Amino acid sequence: MTDAPPRRTWVVVASLTLALFLTILPMPVWGQDFRPQWVALVLIYWCLALPARIGVFWAWGVGLALDVTTGTVLGQHALSLSVVAWLTLELHQRIRIFPLPQQSVSVWVLLLVERLLALWVMGATGQPTPTLWYWMPTLVGMLLWPWVFLVLRDLRRHLGVA
């Protein structure tokens, strides 16, 4: 018998699956441009909270699942989420000490990186250039970050995810 705390990986998987569902949930036409980057937000949280367990390979797998569920070029989200996870892991000790408003700005930059890489892939595959509304989900994600952080932190503490 060991005294190691339970890992409860199912909580991470369930939250990322919920983020995938929120990403493909139908929205009215006027709200399509305001859909936050749920998967990126949840992945950033778990990379900050559990940097030794959640990382680039998780991001790659979730990115492939996101590519399949949204019908984008296979590897588009996998690439962008992997880079975001790597940056988050590199900067996690700095970001974690920030108060939530400063964390929101850091998360906004990470979400911008994700969108920039997705835009690069879209350009490389000959897709049309999106309008300026393409950048709106990064601002919505920045505004939602404090709530995402608090909900996932309370869930992690309540369920004892270590």
Image: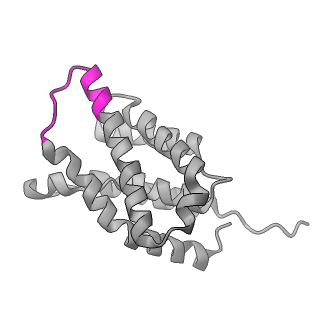
> The C terminus lies in which quarter of the figure?
bottom right
Looking at the rendered image, the quarter that the N terminus falls into is: bottom right
Depth check: give the residue in front, 20 or 43.
Answer: 43
The segment highlighted magenta reads 119-131
Residue 18 on image: x %, y %: 40, 60
Q: Position of residue 102 (x, y in %)?
A: 42, 66
Horizontal side of residue 157 vs 145, given as left or right? right
Residue at the image point whose x is 9% and y is 53% from the top = 29
Query: With respect to residue 70, does 89 lie above or below?
Result: below
Confirm whether the magenta stretch covers residue 121: yes
In the depicted structure, whether residue 40 falls above or below residue 61: below
Residue under the image location 59 percent in, 63 percent down: 49
Residue 87, above or below 121: below
Is residue 74 inside the magenta stretch? no
Q: Is residue 13 left or right of residue 76?
A: right
Q: Is residue 107 left or right of residue 57?
A: left
